[in-house]
Image (cartoon, grey):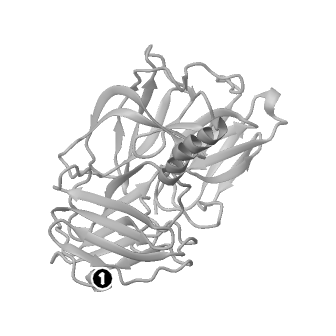
Amino acid sequence: MKSKLLSFFLLLFIVPVIWANPVDSSPICQFSELVFDAKGNWQMEIEFPFRNSLEGLDSVIISTPSGGSAKLLIQPRRSVSYYVITSDSLSSPLYINPKGDKIKFETYNSTFSKYRVDSAVFGNYFRSNVCAPHAGDAVCRVSRNSYYYFYYISSKPTLGYENNFEGVGQTLTGHIYNKDNKPVTSYTSNFVCFEIHSPLILHPDGTYTTTIYEVTYPPDSVFVNGLLISRIGFDYLNQRLPIDSIYFTYSSHDEILVKDIHLKSNDYVLTGIKNNEVPENKELTLLNYPNPFNSSTNFFVKLPGSMRERPANIHIYNSNGRLVKSIQAKDGASSFWDGKDSEGNLVSSGRYYYQLRVESSVLKSGSMIMLK
């Protein structure tokens, strides 16, 4: 009798938990990008992130508070993630207020009785975190992981393709200090990084570089009182590290904004040189020339005697902290970079960052500018 009662209570508890928290990859329609023309007509990019799991997709309803609701007429395919739609793509015209609105996406799945919701809020609508776009500009959304995303304004719409904010960000740099006002030289793990809008590249001398994006039009300023802590490859770590409040105003992506960051916690940071890092050495030289450059540039490397026989590489990162190219470095010789990424594509104009590494040790860092 006791075993039957135990089984009953286990089922009573476990089944609702499983039902409420399924491993869910059922279809969902999500917002990606929105563009208005001078007359207020809109084009919108939507995404089906689980395009390989479209079985049972019944319908998608898109609505706004003042524009009513309409059914999406497009039938998604497994081979396509992004779709560009207008009012003609819906069962009836849908009004979206260019000055600010909330767009709701309701995805119904008849096979699994699933109902999934996504929404986008912009402009002067309540709880919006991005301004209304000018005609021809785009409201874009970028996901950092499964739980965190942010909006930004782009003057270069990428309708039909994954949102790309290369060249629309402004470089933010400065020093980062821990709670005891000591320069932070590294993270506690190679898999942890800080973010405001994009990952912070942290240099051994305590300086950092990152990119911020236009979320409000000048002269409005952005207020930041914490850094997002992300762990590369793990979506579940989504915490905020408190900092002394900073303000910055987005002006132009060609400018560099200098702001020091003061942490209110020493979690996740180191302030000394790690065992696998090498202190400054008079024998160590890293020169980048020409800088700025037009299509190609060179790196001259001189290594300390104890490291001349070890494999050395120069890692090149874009302003978002993503590795663009890794090139081999040799002691006493120049290494050539042709301005192309690891897939052979010519990179866009902008600021790039490089690190000289010997095995897993970071010896020296710097930045360079590519101008076309």
- Residue at 63%, 42% (x, y): give it: 4
Specify the amino acid type for callout 1.
Answer: Leu
- Per the image, the residue denoted by label 1 is 90
SS assignment at label 1: loop
- Residue at 25%, 70% (x, y): give it: 63
Mark 1: few, some, or many residues within 10 Å (few <14, many ≥20)? some
x, y percentage for residue 28?
44, 66
Nearest the camera: 337 or 183?
Answer: 183
Instruction: Place residue 272 in its image quadrant.
Output: top right
x, y percentage for residue 30?
40, 65
- Whether residue 101 is visible, yes or no, is yes
Nearest the camera: 202 or 191?
Answer: 191
x, y percentage for residue 194?
48, 36
Looking at the picture, does residue 251 appear above or below residue 2?
below
Residue farthest top in this picture: 180
Nearest the camera: 338 or 141?
Answer: 141
- Whether residue 287 is visible, yes or no, is no
- Residue at 55%, 39% (x, y): give it: 366
Q: Is residue 199 left or right of residue 60?
A: right
Residue farthest front in this picture: 1
